[in-house]
């Protein structure tokens, strides 16, 4: 009896004694797709002994080199600096410590040109819980981890895709959902699928907002697409062939009951804005609405040529649209064909651009909207961001081309994304 009592007291003392030092088994980073790539918003640390996590407080931890992922701080208009308040919140599940924080650039703090100092997590209560980016053993990406990936072949092309399908409260895929297909920019052409999916918030914007809409993006290999691509039939034929492939894949999703063929939407930025225009030229009767953002010029040359007279760009676009201007798949090949003008002008579009965009001139948006108006379009909308508008969304005026940032972040009343959601 005496020995049992002594043993019990010893065990109680051990249980109530000082918290043992943690032994870290793995470090996992939780990330989200931000406006400029991946941002970390939580760190999960798995330890061998759950007791080593008892009594820890948020104030025991400090993140360093954790800088918001943006060109400028929207509040100050200056370069982002480390958070004064990291916004740390602790939670413990058995032997896993989760540290939620304000989102910060996954790669750490910028230092000079193209260099970054990796982030670190410091723990004043236990140095064993000091971890750094170099110790990360795994990563979770919100929304993208739940996406389907694969490849699809059509018309002699094979392209990889990533598809988000919305789920209900029970985690079941919602059938016959609306679909937004995003057309990638030239900076993502001929890149791997993950680069495409994380370049901006194209796949995650609607899901993060809680909108039950499927989102789709393809990794396209158009290394020869550049300004005035419309001068080269082989270049615009490839754009249209890519679009035909995407439409064939969408038809498969419709046949499988995954998306609603009556609620298809398209958007894209830069080269993707131009490809959105060409997609709608081919398949206007299939889509409910489209958002071309900071569009390139795969219809007529605009960006590296000057107008010979005011209105020339719109005249040139209108002339092209009235002739044989799109390539369509006829079962064996892509064939130059006329556009369905009636369906094209009935399809509502919301054009987005920045006034001082130096990569894709706002003249392309003005030309497209004017040419559509002449053909009979009556439901188009246009939003031209000023430099002041861009700063409010963390975009420096020198980077005015990035008008897809406010586009994909803003769901306020009357915004393009609000307009899109209300059509779903």
Image (tube, helix red, strand yellow):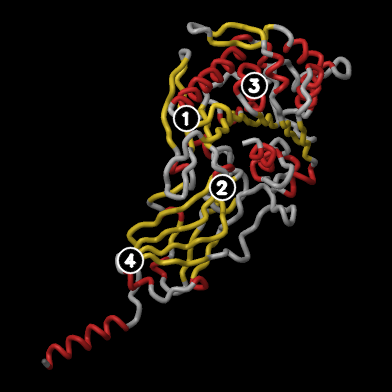
* Camera-nearest label, 2 or 1: 2
Which of the marked residues, 2 or 1, is nearer the chain's N terminus? 1
Q: SS at mark 1?
A: strand
Mark 1 in CB contact with mark 4 (< 8 angstroms): no
Asked whether disc 4 touches disc 3, contact meaning CB atoms under 8 Å apart, the reply is no
Q: Quadrant of the N terminus?
A: bottom left
Q: Is residue 38 above or below residue 258?
A: below
Image x and y of residue 12, in percent: 26, 85
| Residue at mark 4 | 23
Secondary element at image label 4 = loop
The residue depicted at 64 percent of the width and 39 percent of the height is 421
Query: Which of marks 1 and 3 precedes in the sequence?
Result: 1
Pointer 3 and pointer 1: residues touching (CB < 8 Å)?
A: no
Mark earlier in primary sequence (4, 3): 4
- In this rendered view, identify the residue nearer to me: 305 or 127: 305
Residue 215 location in percent, x, y?
A: 53, 35
Between the residue at mark 4 and the residue at mark 3, the CA separation in whole angstroms equals: 57 Å
Mark-to-mark CA distance, 2 and 1: 22 Å
**335 left or right, relative to 168:** right
At 39% from the left and 57% from the top, the residue drawn is 27
Measured in 3D between alpha carbons, the distance from the residue under mark 3 to the one under mark 1, in whole angstroms, is 20 Å
First in sequence, mark 1 or 4: give its number: 4
Quickly name the residue at label 3. 280
Q: Which residue is mark 2?
A: 210
Please state which of residues 255 and 188 is positioned toward the viewer in this rendering: 255
State the CA–CA distance, disc 2 to disc 3.
Answer: 27 Å
């Amino acid at each position: 009896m005496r020995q049992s009592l002594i043993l019990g007291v010893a065990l109680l003392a051990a249980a109530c004694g000082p918290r043992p030092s943690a032994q870290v088994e793995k470090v996992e980073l939780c990330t989200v797709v931000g406006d400029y790539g991946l941002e970390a918003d939580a760190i999960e640390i798995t330890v061998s002994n759950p007791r080593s996590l008892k009594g820890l407080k948020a104030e025991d931890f400090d993140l360093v080199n954790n800088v918001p992922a943006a060109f400028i701080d929207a509040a100050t208009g200056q370069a982002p600096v480390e958070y004064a308040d990291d916004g740390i919140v602790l939670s413990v599940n058995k032997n896993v410590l989760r540290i939620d924080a304000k989102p910060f650039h996954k790669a750490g703090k910028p230092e000079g040109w193209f260099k970054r100092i990796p982030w670190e997590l410091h723990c004043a209560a236990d140095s064993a819980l000091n971890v750094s980016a170099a110790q990360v053993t795994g990563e979770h990406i919100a929304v993208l981890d739940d996406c389907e990936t694969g490849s699809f072949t059509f018309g002699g092309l094979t392209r990889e895709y990533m598809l988000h399908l919305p789920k209900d409260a029970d985690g079941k895929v919602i059938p016959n959902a609306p679909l937004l297909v995003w057309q990638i920019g030239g900076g993502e052409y001929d890149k791997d699928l993950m680069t495409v999916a994380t370049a901006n918030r194209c796949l995650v914007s609607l899901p993060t907002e809680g909108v039950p809409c499927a989102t789709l993006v393809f990794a396209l290999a158009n290394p020869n697409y550049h300004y005035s691509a419309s001068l080269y039939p082989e270049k615009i034929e490839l754009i249209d062939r890519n679009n035909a492939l995407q439409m064939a894949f969408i038809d498969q999703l419709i046949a499988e009951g995954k998306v609603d063929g009556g609620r298809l939407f398209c958007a894209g930025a830069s080269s993707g804005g131009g490809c959105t225009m060409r997609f709608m030229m081919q398949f206007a009767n299939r889509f409910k609405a489209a958002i071309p953002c900071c569009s390139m010029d795969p219809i007529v040359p605009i960006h590296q040529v000057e107008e010979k007279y005011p209105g020339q760009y719109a005249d040139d676009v209108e002339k092209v649209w009235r002739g044989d201007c799109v390539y369509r798949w006829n079962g064996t090949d892509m064939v130059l064909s006329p556009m369905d003008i009636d369906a094209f002008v009935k399809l509502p579009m919301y054009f987005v651009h920045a006034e001082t965009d130096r990569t894709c001139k706002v003249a392309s948006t003005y030309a497209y909207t004017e040419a559509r108006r002449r053909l009979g379009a009556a439901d188009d909308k246009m939003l031209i961001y000023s430099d002041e508008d861009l700063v409010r969304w963390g975009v420096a005026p020198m980077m005015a081309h990035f008008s897809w940032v406010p586009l994909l972040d803003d769901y306020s009343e009357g915004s393009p994304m609000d307009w899109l959601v209300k059509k779903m």
